[in-house]
Image: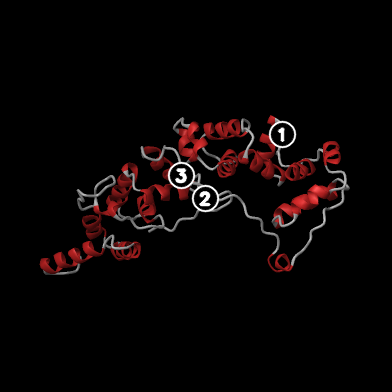
Amino acid sequence: MSGARDERVSAMAEEALARAWGSDQKASNRIWTALADTPGPASRFLFAPAPDCPHEPRVRLVTAPPDGGRVLRAALDCPDPKVREAMAGVLRATDHPVLLGDFEAALGGGGTASQAVLDLALDNPHLCRPAPVGQYRTGLAVVAILKGRADLLDSYDPASVVSELVRLAGRTFPAPVAEVCRRWLRALGPGPGREWLCLLAGEGDAEALAAAMDSGQEPESPNLLARFLFCTEQWERYDALDPDGALLEEHVQGIDEDSWDHLAETARRNGREVPKLQWSSTMLLTGPDPDPPAGGRQGAGYEIW
């Protein structure tokens, strides 16, 4: 498109790209890749006005943005400063779900998002809203907290948001983040969020353990309570609840390797018998592998231009 000497050829090429753009996600991704080394034509094509675009800002890029976090990476790392700032401008204003999802993926799930990503996210007015129905990823929790909207945390899947707040409490985000996370974790009511907090505490997570012990929270499930009391070394209560070890033994069948190692180390350190695992043929091949709540421990990487 940029190398054509005849302006008519250039116009025809751009028209063909415009027809292909948005026809499917793969087409948008391919065009994005093809334009990556030509910042001038890329800017002209991607930021062309699109009055009928249902999302903000109304430019061609937002009609069908490429996935994989490409726009976010361009806003951070594109060598051309004009393109970089234009991409950042789109991200500050957009309400497109793909681009908002890129923020969430970059900020959550154990990612290593930079301060620049967080700054862009805080500028966008569409990121601080209740989670859509069925939303499990909780990367935007830090945005809600920093904008003074901790009430939005209640809109996320309880177990998933507990995992995210435990993670955030131990990270080097601005000071209010850890404070809000720790306060919120200590005020959990009965339900899946509390059960998951106690599970994490029983696995030895320092933030989860501190939250549970400081607030006196414990799981309602007898099996999980047995494991919680065992792993937090509350031996008098554990022995009263599970004198023959049956509850604990039932609970630990199929737990993951790290959790098993923590439980076994706790038992040995205290001169306790290590619960027995009933190994199945599947476990012999794959090892213990429990199903965490959706989004509870999922990493979130993002591939970007």
Residue drawn where x is 29% and y is 46% of the image: 55
Q: Which residue does the image show at 87% across and 51% down from the upper left? A: 273
Q: Tell me: residue 122, above or below residue 134.
A: above
Q: Earlier in the sequence, mark 1 or mark 3?
A: 3
Q: List the residue tagged with mark 2.
A: 111
Report if the CB atoms under discs 2 and 1 are less than 8 Å apart. no
Location of residue 29 with respect to 154 vertically, above or below: below
Expressed as whole percent of the image width and height from the top left, the position of residue 231 reads 77, 44
- The residue type indicated by label 2 comes to Gly
Nearer to us in this view, 134 or 66: 134
Q: Which residue is mark 1?
A: 213
Q: Secondary structure at mark 2?
A: loop
Q: Alpha carbon of mark 2 to alpha carbon of mark 1: how far?
A: 28 Å
Q: Earlier along the polypeptide chain: callout 2 or callout 3?
A: 2
- Percent x, y of residue 259: 71, 52
Left or right: 231, with 132 as reference point: right
